Image: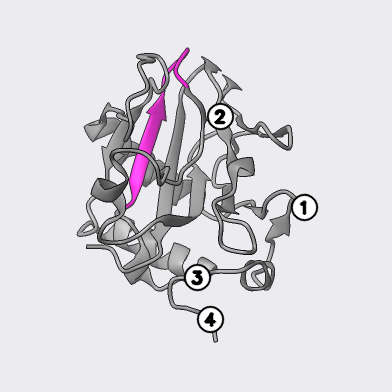
């Protein structure tokens, strides 16, 4: 029986339009037109209205490592709540395991250098971020606009470039089949060369959030 905090390739591939990237190194999925243009515009406007400089959990001394802005989206907003529910329906993961949704905004020259979404167990801040809800499991990310130039997401280990496309969702399991953390999920939000890039990210946890 599936855990309420878990998705799977079988679940995702049973959803209409979901495609799996052919790799033995990680589970990576793409779904075009997950959000409508109207949904994208409404979420983009929220991010534009209330973004702040992004931070990283464990500062590595590189002030240019993550140069985007972040927006903490209120779960009380009907559009945000609807998106969280839509993502839970797609993933099959109980919404109790979802972190609050976040939006990210990238201007020309901004990026998030190669990183993984899980928290390193040997890091000093691991207990701070994982003591209640546990480790991050799945990542679901939606592009809200077409970027004029740049802004691709590059999975470095498998050398896969995913171009931003309005409404397109990408998803990946941050672990291997045996449950261990998967370093092949290393990905780089590459620099925007022209225009802006807006995305929404949903992370799920091993245990209920909060």
- Mark positioned earlier in the residue sequence (1 or 4): 4
C-alpha span from label 3 to label 1: 20 Å
Look at the numbered discs 4 and 3 and tell me whether their residues touch, using CB distance below 8 Å.
yes
Crowding near pointer 3: few (<14 within 10 Å), some, many (20+)? some
C-alpha span from label 2 to label 3: 25 Å
User: For numbered disc 2, what is the local secondary structure?
Assistant: strand
- Mark positioned earlier in the residue sequence (2 or 3): 3
Q: In this view, does 67 lie above or below 210?
A: above
Identity of the residue drawn at 56% across and 29% down: 188
Tell whether 22 sits left or right of 199.
Answer: right
Mark number, residue 188: 2
Crowding near pointer 1: few (<14 within 10 Å), some, many (20+)? few
Crowding near pointer 4: few (<14 within 10 Å), some, many (20+)? few
C-alpha span from label 4 to label 3: 7 Å
C-alpha span from label 2 to label 4: 31 Å
User: In the image shown, does 68 or 144 lie closer to the viewer?
Assistant: 68
Residue 106 sits inside the magenta stretch? yes
Quadrant the C terminus occupies:
bottom left
- Mark positioned earlier in the residue sequence (3 or 1): 3
User: For numbered disc 4, what is the local secondary structure?
Assistant: loop
Mark number, residue 6: 3
Identity of the residue drawn at 60% across and 52% down: 33
User: For numbered disc 1, what is the local secondary structure?
Assistant: loop
From the image, tell me which residue sits under label 1.
Answer: 24
Quadrant the N terminus occupies:
bottom right
For residue 66, what is the image quadrant? top left
Magenta segment, which residues?
101-111
């Amino acid at each position: 029986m599936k855990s309420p905090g878990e998705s799977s390739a079988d679940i995702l591939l049973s959803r209409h339009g979901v495609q799996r990237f052919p790799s033995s190194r990680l589970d990576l999925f793409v779904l075009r037109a997950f959000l409508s243009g109207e949904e994208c515009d409404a979420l983009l406007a929220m991010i534009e209205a209330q973004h702040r400089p992004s931070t990283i959990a464990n500062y590595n001394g590189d002030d240019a490592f993550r140069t985007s802005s972040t927006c903490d989206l209120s779960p009380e907003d009907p559009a945000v709540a609807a998106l969280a529910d839509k993502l839970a329906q797609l993933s099959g993961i109980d919404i109790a395991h979802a972190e609050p949704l976040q939006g990210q905004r990238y201007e020309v020259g901004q990026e998030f250098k190669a990183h993984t979404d899980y928290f390193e167990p040997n890091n000093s801040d691991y207990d701070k971020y994982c003591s209640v809800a546990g480790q991050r499991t799945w990542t679901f990310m939606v592009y809200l606009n077409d970027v004029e130039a740049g802004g691709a997401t590059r999975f470095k280990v498998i050398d896969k470039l995913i171009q931003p496309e309005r409404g397109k969702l990408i998803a990946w399991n941050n672990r291997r089949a045996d449950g261990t953390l998967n370093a092949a999920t290393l990905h780089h939000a590459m620099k925007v060369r022209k225009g802006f890039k807006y995305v929404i990210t949903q992370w799920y946890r091993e245990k209920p959030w909060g």
